Amino acid sequence: MVLSDWPIIMWGDFSEKFFMDGTKEVKHRREFGHQGGELSEQGARGTVAGLYSEIRDTMGPSMVNLIYRRMATEEGVLEWVWAWINGAINSLDIEDELAQLSDGVAWPAVKSVQRASLPLLGIDEVEEIKLASVLSQYNRGNSLNLLLLNAFLAHQKKGKVLQGPRMQPLKARRVHVKELPPILDLGQMGQDTAAVVRVLAKYVSLPGSLMMPSLFRHLAHWPGFLALVAPHILQSIANGEVRKVSSCLKERAVSKVSVLKLQTTDIITEKVPSIDIRDYWAEEINSYLQKPIPEMIVIGNMIESILPDEEK
């Protein structure tokens, strides 16, 4: 078990004990602040549970991406970042922005499987719908994060993310999507499946650390499918396709920051973390934007193309 896994496991055992009052919630969040941990959706209580619900309702996917679960481990960070993101996403024609981000992108080519072959992978019609929903929701969530977190960092550098009164909540823009199965911990997977997840994670992790992308942990619900796509993922990483396409996505996202028509209210939250904490998390967010997030967009879209077309 690696460092990034143990906080997830511990939440299930101790969440009720630690979240009986706000003081214990703050204490528990701080314990994992700079240790590479995360606060799982199942373990979230109080303020964090409310923020997670708001993130799901506003961004669309029925799960909370890893970067936000990481932010939730330090008091005030998720509140600070999400207040700005929430305002930004509600002031954009976000569907148009997402379409422009991926328009004309040539994802690594992979031959799709025949629908008749899916039962051999343990996937029936119901499971195929679940699997397709997992992939589409991750691709949407990661694309949103690439756009919005780049914009957040740009505004922070300009000193426009300031202390002041929190904005009024804006209307949720929930896309009606299917609920996803829970994210699996390594200990909940078979040994072979956990080994595959570790190998895949190694190649998309930040330098010097081992993160566990949630998509791989979700795909562990379908071990046969994960085993099928893993060699394609590794090959596309090895031959540079993932890096090439992710670089294109990064350039597009950065170029769009200056033209995004965001809300004019820059004073958005009751309390901003200290300068040291802001600097730490700005660096952390930037690291995710340089490698894991854009690379997982490429990998997610590549995997999605493996599923049978509707007519097959």
Image (cartoon, rainbow, N blue to C red):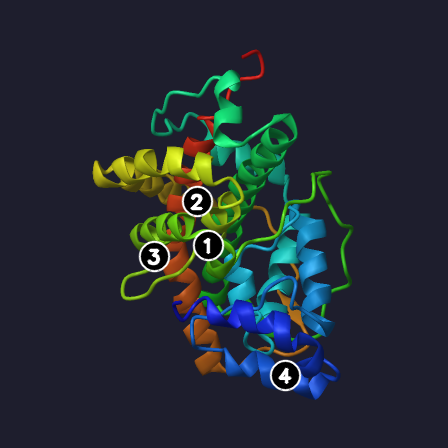
Residue under circle 3?
205
**C-alpha distance separating marks 4 and 1:** 28 Å
Residue under circle 1?
150
Is residue 244 in sight in this rendering? no
Q: Quadrant of the N terminus?
A: bottom left
Q: Kindly give the residue lying farthest to the left in the view shown.
A: 239
Of callouts 2 and 3, the N-terminal one: 3
Classify mark 3: residues with Cα within 10 Å, few (<14), some (14-19) or many (20+): some
**C-alpha distance separating marks 2 and 3:** 20 Å
Which three-letter amino acid code belongs to the residue tagged 2?
Answer: Ala
Circles 1 and 2: CB atoms closer than 8 Å: yes
Q: Nearer the viewer, residue 47 or 79?
A: 47
Which three-letter amino acid code belongs to the residue tagged 1?
Answer: Asn
Say if 38 sits above or below 103 in the image. Answer: below
Q: Nearer the viewer, residue 193 or 132?
A: 193
Secondary structure state at the residue bearing disc 2: helix
Of callouts 4 and 1, the N-terminal one: 4
Residue under circle 4?
26
